[in-house]
Amino acid sequence: MRAIGVKVALVTLVNNNKYHKAFYWVKGRYLSASDITLIQAAMFKDYYHFFRQNHQFLMFGLLTAFFGNYGQSFFIAWFGDSFLSSFNLTNAEYGTVYSSATLVSGFLILWAGALIDKISLKKFTYGVSGGLAIACLLLYLSEDLWQLVLALFLLRFCGQGLMFHIAFTSMARYFENNRGKAIGVVAFGMPLGEAILPALAVTLISTLGWRETWLVLGVFLLVVFWPIMNFLLNRSQDRLSLYDETVSAQPNETKAQWSRNDVIKDYRFWVLIPVVVAPAFIVTGIFIHQGILLSTKGWSEQWFALCFTIYAFSHLKSSLIIGSMVDKYSGQAMILYYLLPMLLGIVCLALPFSQSYWALAFMFLTGLTIGAAGPVVGSMWVEIYGNKNIGAIRSMVTSIMVVSTAISPILFGWLFDSDHSYQQVMNYLIGYIVVAILLMKIFVLNTRKSTEA
């Protein structure tokens, strides 16, 4: 009878779009598959209504994130052999070029990312996506090494850095009550790219050639993304204008609106940074040196490539589920837990087992953390520091994150070259995550609770 009563309550709550309360009805008891199905159905129904009401602006953010994947390591890696042979580079030379381009882009994002607070969203997006298109066209025309270096810089700067900065900053700024869901929807652009772009690159390279592939990608940005972006932003003017009117009508906000200089002086920011950059730092280091992982575990490249499907799936589902939970509990409340799946995933790699299902476990668990990072971290900065200067604040965070992704391949490579075993390196990462979480718990979350009390 109790199970029937719980399910009746769940059905009622589903019909009323109050699925969050369903968790309290079943708290302390085992959730059956049908219970979970009901809860998920309610969540996706809520997302459906939210998307219908805001689909133009959400699609703008999603497409911006999708095309930002042009500058992600997982996509550029498919052209690595072509770069090596076409420009007569050794692996070490190519690694130096790539890391240098990433480092420079990371430092410049600190300045360029803040412009989103001062320039209209449409103009800023035109400029950034135009720079990304120039990178693609430059690779098509490149004959000398300096052209490759400049193109890689623009890919990392405009793609990995600023396109994602636009997507997440705009969602964090222009949504208040449903910020977590908005970021969760936009974050879908990354796993969508992970699922589509590698196969597209392999197909185009084999049929057209690597240079012509970049020409197609650049033209696609100008011919497809630009008009769609312009249309979507024009149809979203009510939302953009509402924010501007709200800011003008409330010059003396009751909520703190921190400047970037104020944030730099706040010790909590620096305690949070190791937790915030951990996913990108760790995933970049592991994936760039995945050859060592595969040789250590005896896994085939084909199998590990297949595991990326699981990674993209868990990434997507996590971003949607956690995005909804952030709206209920806040990013500050969930920051303590979002690294735990990745921590368990790294434990899977640290264990002295080589069965193929451990790769699946690692990719699934890591995808959960990567998916949660967008809504949790993106919402947290606005909750703590306000949204007036969120572009400048996020650009600082993005800059630090990009620099960390330039450092991690070098650091991981140095550790492996220094005869540290793969298991030892994974143990170092486990220690890093545990210490970062404990420091955050002690110096940030406890402080916030005492202040609120």
Image (cartoon, rainbow, N blue to C red):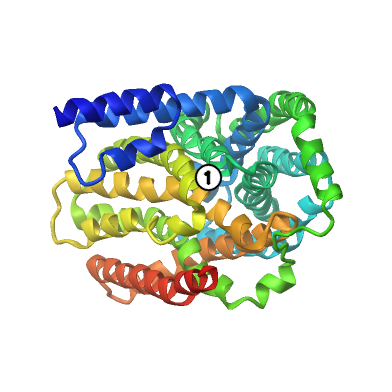
What residue lies at 26% left-to-right and 44% top-to-bottom?
27
Q: Is residue 444 above or below residue 102?
A: below
Left or right: 230 in relation to 441: right
Compared with 412, 225 (above or below) is above
Q: Which of 408 and 79 is in front in this view?
A: 408
- Name the side, left or right, on which 141 lies relative to 364: right
Image coordinates of residue 362 in percent, x first then y, are: 27, 50
Under tag 1, what secondary structure?
A: helix
Q: Badge 1 local density, few (<14 within 10 Å), some, or many (20+)?
A: some
Return the residue nearer the eye: 357 or 422: 357
The three-letter code of the residue at mark 1 reads Ile
x, y (%) of residue 53?
A: 63, 24
Residue 235: image location, x then y, percent: 76, 24
Q: Where is residue 152 in the image (x, y as percent from the top left)?
A: 63, 51
Q: Residue at x 62, y 35 (%)?
A: 214
User: Looking at the image, which is closer to me, 338 or 116?
Assistant: 338
Above or below, comparing residue 404 to residue 22 in the picture? below
Q: Mark 1 points at which residue?
A: 76
Compared to residue 169, the image places residue 257 above or below, namely: below
Q: In which quarter of the image is the N terminus?
A: top left
In this orientation, does residue 141 appear? yes
The residue drawn where x is 70% and y is 63% is 256
Image position of 160 (left or right of 342)? right
